[in-house]
Image: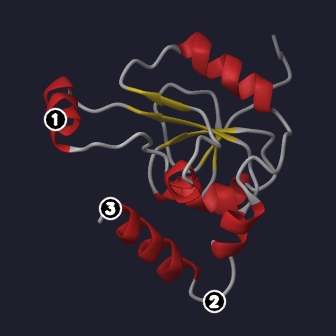
Amino acid sequence: VHPDAGFVVPGPVAGLDAVWVDGIAAVAGADVAVVASGTATLELAALDVPMVVVYRVYPATAAVARRLLQVERVALPNVLAGRDCVPEHLQRLDPDAIAADALRLVGRRGQVPREIVAGLQGERAVERAADEVARWLR
C-alpha cells in the first residue's frame, strides 16, 4: 500500500528490514509508531507521535490477569486519559487490523489529550505520571 514506507526500530529486531536507532527520541519524527505497551507509550505521547499499542503475554498469564485485574485499558496514555486515545491490540495481534489502525493515524498528531502530554513534559514529569498511575491502581 505504501511502497515508500520505512521502519525505524529503537533496538535490534532480527529479520526486519529496518534502520536501528538508539533511543526512543530517534523516532520523534515518525509519522506513526507501532509500540509495545509500556513506558515507551508515554515517551511517544510526550513527543506527540501517533501510535498503535500492541502487547501479548502467555495465554495462562492473560487468563490470570483477566481474573485478578478489572481494567478497561492497558496503554498508559489511555489509562491516564481515562478513555481510549490510542488503539490497543492485546493478545490477538492481527497484522491487518494493526496496519489499518496505523495507516489511519499516519501523521495525525494530537492523538493524546494536550493536558496528558503537558503532564509528561518538563520537570518531575516521570514522578507525575507515576503518581497518576499509582492513583489509578488504588
The CA span between labels 3 and 2 is 23 Å
Question: Residue 48: percent from the left, percent from the top?
Answer: 76, 56
User: On the image, which quarter does residue 37 sit in?
Assistant: top left
Q: Is residue 96 left or right of residue 58?
A: right
Residue that badge 1 annotates: 67
Task: Locate the N terminus by quadrant.
Answer: top right
**Image marks 2 and 1: residues in contact by CB distance under 8 Å:** no
**Image marks 3 and 2: residues in contact by CB distance under 8 Å:** no
Question: Residue 50: percent from the left, percent from the top?
Answer: 73, 43
Could you tell me which secondary element the residue under label 1 belongs to? Answer: helix
Question: Residue 71: percent from the left, percent from the top?
Answer: 35, 43
Q: Nearer the viewer, mark 3 or mark 2?
A: 3
Q: Is residue 83 left or right of residue 68?
A: right
Q: Amino acid at mark 2?
A: Glu
Mark 2 or mark 3, which is nearer the start of the sequence? 2
Could you tell me which secondary element the residue under label 2 belongs to? Answer: loop
From this view, report whether residue 138 is shown above or below residue 16: below
Q: Amino acid at mark 1?
A: Arg
For this rendering, which residue is in front, 84 or 38?
A: 84
Q: Is residue 130 left or right of residue 106?
A: left
From this view, report whether residue 6 is shown above or below residue 22: above
Residue drawn where x is 83% and y is 17% of the image:
2
Residue drawn where x is 46% and y is 31% of the image:
14
Please give the label number shown on residue 123: 2
Question: Does residue 127 appear in the picture of this structure?
Answer: yes
Please give the label number shown on residue 106: none
Q: Amino acid at mark 3?
A: Leu
Q: Residues within 10 Å of mark 1 (few under 14, many from 20)?
A: few
The CA span between labels 2 and 1 is 37 Å
Residue that badge 3 annotates: 137
Q: Is residue 6 left or right of residue 75?
A: right
Number of numbered discs overlaid on the protein picture: 3
